[in-house]
Image (tube, rainbow, N blue to C red):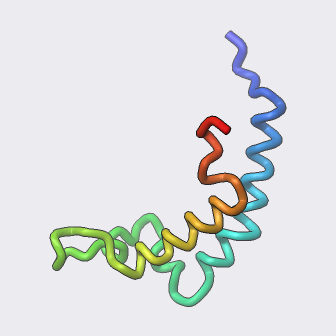
Amino acid sequence: MDFNLPQELIDYLAELDTFIENEIKPLENRDDNIFFFDLRREWARTDFDNEGLPREEWEGVLAQVRRISDKAGHLRFPLPK
């Protein structure tokens, strides 16, 4: 079995890492958003008083991430052109 990754995928992963560092990390560090991104903060993202739905603030941050990712071409990466 060949476990080597194709160079095209390696290149894309490097591009994605750069995108995360340059675009997503600043959003994560803006305002109080780091509170949502910490994996141990599920309580911060979940509105337990509203049947466990995601908090509006978290949904707003996710919407920003989706817009940024879509504009950069990463959100729809796995879809056919």
Residue at the extreme top: 1
| Front-lying residue, 38 or 10 | 10
Task: Using residue 71 as the reference point, say whether residue 44 is left or right of it.
Answer: left
Furthest residue toward front: 81
Residue 80 in which image quadrant: top right
List x then y, in percent, for residue 29: 62, 81
Q: What is the quadrant of residue 44 in the picture?
A: bottom left
Picture coordinates of residue 58, whole percent (x, y): 42, 75
Q: Seen in the image, is 77 located left or right of residue 50?
A: right
Above or below, 5 relative to 30: above
Residue 25, percent from left and from top = 66, 72
**Quick check: 81 above or below 54?**
above
Quadrant, the N terminus: top right
Image vertical order of residue 9 relative to residue 33, above or below: above
Nearer to me, 22 or 76: 76
Q: Specify the quadrant that holds the C terminus.
A: top right
Please count the marks in the image. Answer: 0
Residue visible at 40% across and 67% down?
40
Q: Position of residue 43 (x, y in %)?
A: 31, 73
Which of 41 and 67 lies nearest the eye of the viewer? Answer: 67
